[in-house]
Image (cartoon, helix red, strand yellow):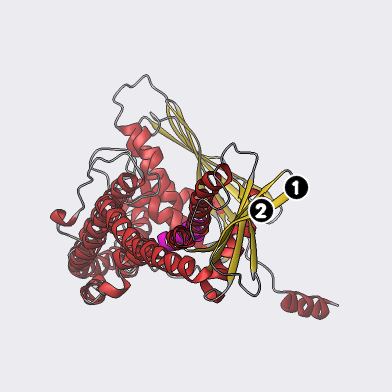
């Protein structure tokens, strides 16, 4: 069977389709989560370092203010030089001053620096300025002198402290290192938690669907390879159910194709023997032409035509099995005569209660292959006759009527019968072999063959109406298109 090679190719390709770990969804998800969380940590790191610097300076200024208030309230020389040095050393400051009612007073001093490098106003510090000064301290600080000033608490006095920047920078570096380490640990923990959750909810079901598709591609005829949906109500659950439905439908289609292939092989074998039998019958029928009996002379031509058609059908079985009908050999055909041959081919008894009506005008012509047109009409007519013959009620009108009309270059043939109509299943699968049959035991091949032959003519078959007592099929056959070059040449020859 031709499908075997395709299945082998799909199986070989599927067996080698393995995704490396480095390119797997889980690895990509883990890396993306780490990167995104680290980007989020950057927005936490920057204000954290800035806030640490402000808090460090505010603590030093608050301590200096506490000492300053004690000094302001005590006698000017109440503290010795040694005590002042110890106070400033505890603060890490060079001097402490207070500003009250517009006047400034130096409270404690160990040394006066040659210059103040940076002025820090804690009372008017915006967030952008705080961030800028924090990175300035981290990158360029070290030996500079800071003048830190601002109000403390509810006091109406403003305190100032001169302090070296090296201690501040060292504390900030330690804090930044701790925050950076935490920023690395948090993304890893977050990534693992996110990975574990998404791996359970998404990656594992997707892997299961992938394995199911690969296994199904290897052995599509094994029902055990069809995925079992988990019953989830989210997108993954929908995908699982759709995949299971698709695999089930595909398995059913492959089984039908295998059945058709087996049937085609059987028909080919039967066709070989049938053709030999018909050839012998054809030879015997030829001898009947020499019989002088008038009755025999009346039926022999019809018998010969029927056997010739049967031989032609058997020769076309193989081409139909390959879904290749011969292209039509189109000529101008008198449709009324073709309909008469169809009526004769139906073989109804003289006493049959089925009426055959040939309502085609004698001069109506169709541009078609006469043999293929005969097959189209005989298949449709045979189906109608069989449907009406199944009804044993003699009071019911049983009539098969064939009429036609031409509109421009299109001929439309109507096949009407007074049968019981088509059941819903037959209407839904009208032109599908082995499914679209209207009667029990039928194959549905007649309509499928008729439709294929009509399409070869560039036409179509459609069911116009089907109900109890009235069923109408319409066969549309357009004339073959005229080549412009040939038409012009014909006009010139006539001229």
Query: Where does the image place residue 313, in percent across and percent down from the top left?
Result: 33, 63
- Above or below, 337 against 484 in this view is above
Q: In the figure, is residue 140 to the left or right of 216? A: right
The residue under label 2 is 105
Front residue of 310 and 384? 384
**From which residue to which does the magenta span run?**
37-49
- Residue 311's disc number: none
**Which image quadrant: the C terminus?**
bottom right
Quadrant where the N terminus lies?
A: bottom left
The disc label shown at residue 102, or none:
1
Q: Is residue 333 magenta?
A: no
Q: Quadrant of residue 322?
A: bottom left
Viewer-nearest of labels 1 and 2? Answer: 2
Of 329 and 284, nearer the camera is 329
Q: Is residue 253 visible?
A: no
Q: Nearer the viewer, residue 108 or 230?
A: 108
């Amino acid at each position: 069977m031709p499908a075997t090679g395709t299945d082998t190719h799909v199986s070989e390709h599927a067996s080698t389709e393995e995704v490396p770990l480095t390119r797997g969804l889980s690895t990509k998800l883990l890396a993306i989560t780490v990167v995104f969380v680290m980007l989020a940590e950057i927005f936490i790191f920057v204000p954290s370092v800035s806030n640490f610097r402000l808090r460090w300076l505010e603590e030093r200024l608050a301590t200096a203010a506490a000492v300053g208030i004690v000094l302001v309230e005590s006698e000017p020389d109440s503290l010795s030089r040694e005590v002042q040095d110890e106070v400033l050393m505890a603060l890490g400051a060079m001097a402490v001053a207070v500003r009250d009612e517009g006047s400034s007073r130096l409270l404690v001093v160990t040394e006066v620096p040659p210059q103040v490098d940076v002025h820090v106003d804690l009372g008017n510090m915006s967030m952008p300025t705080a961030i800028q000064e924090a990175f300035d301290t981290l990158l360029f600080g070290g030996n500079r002198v800071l003048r830190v000033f601002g109000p403390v608490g509810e006091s109406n006095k403003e305190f100032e402290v001169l302090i070296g920047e090296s201690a501040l920078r060292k504390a900030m570096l330690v804090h930044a290192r701790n925050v950076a380490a935490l920023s690395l640990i948090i993304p890893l923990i977050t990534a693992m938690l996110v990975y574990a959750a998404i791996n359970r909810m998404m990656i594992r079901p997707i892997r299961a669907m992938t394995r199911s598709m690969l296994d199904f591609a290897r052995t599509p005829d094994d029902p055990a390879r069809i995925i079992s949906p988990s019953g989830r109500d989210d997108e993954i659950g929908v995908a699982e159910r759709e995949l299971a439905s698709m695999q089930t439908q595909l398995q059913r289609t492959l089984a039908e194709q295998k059945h058709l292939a087996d049937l085609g092989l059987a028909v080919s074998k039967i066709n070989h023997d049938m053709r030999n039998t018909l050839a012998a019958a054809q030879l015997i029928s030829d001898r009947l032409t020499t019989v002088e009996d008038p009755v025999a002379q009346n039926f022999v031509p019809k018998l010969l035509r029927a056997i010739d058609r049967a031989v032609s059908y058997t020769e076309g079985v193989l081409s139909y099995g390959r879904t290749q009908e011969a292209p039509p050999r189109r000529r101008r055909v008198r449709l009324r005569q073709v309909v008469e041959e169809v009526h004769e081919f139906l073989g109804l008894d003289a006493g049959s209660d089925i009426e055959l009506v040939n309502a085609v005008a004698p001069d109506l012509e169709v541009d078609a292959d006469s043999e293929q047109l005969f097959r189209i009409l005989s298949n449709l007519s045979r189906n109608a006759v069989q449907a009406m013959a199944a009804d044993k009620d003699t009071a019911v009108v049983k009539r098969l009527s064939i009429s036609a009309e031409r509109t421009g270059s299109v001929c439309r043939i109507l096949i009407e019968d007074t049968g019981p109509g088509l059941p819903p299943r037959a209407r839904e699968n009208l032109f599908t072999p082995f499914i679209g049959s209207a009667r029990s035991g039928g194959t549905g091949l007649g309509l499928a063959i008729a439709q294929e032959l009509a399409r070869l003519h560039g036409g179509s078959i459609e069911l116009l109406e089907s109900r109890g007592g009235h069923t109408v099929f319409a066969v549309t056959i357009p004339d073959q298109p005229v080549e412009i070059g040939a038409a012009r040449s014909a006009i010139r020859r006539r001229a």
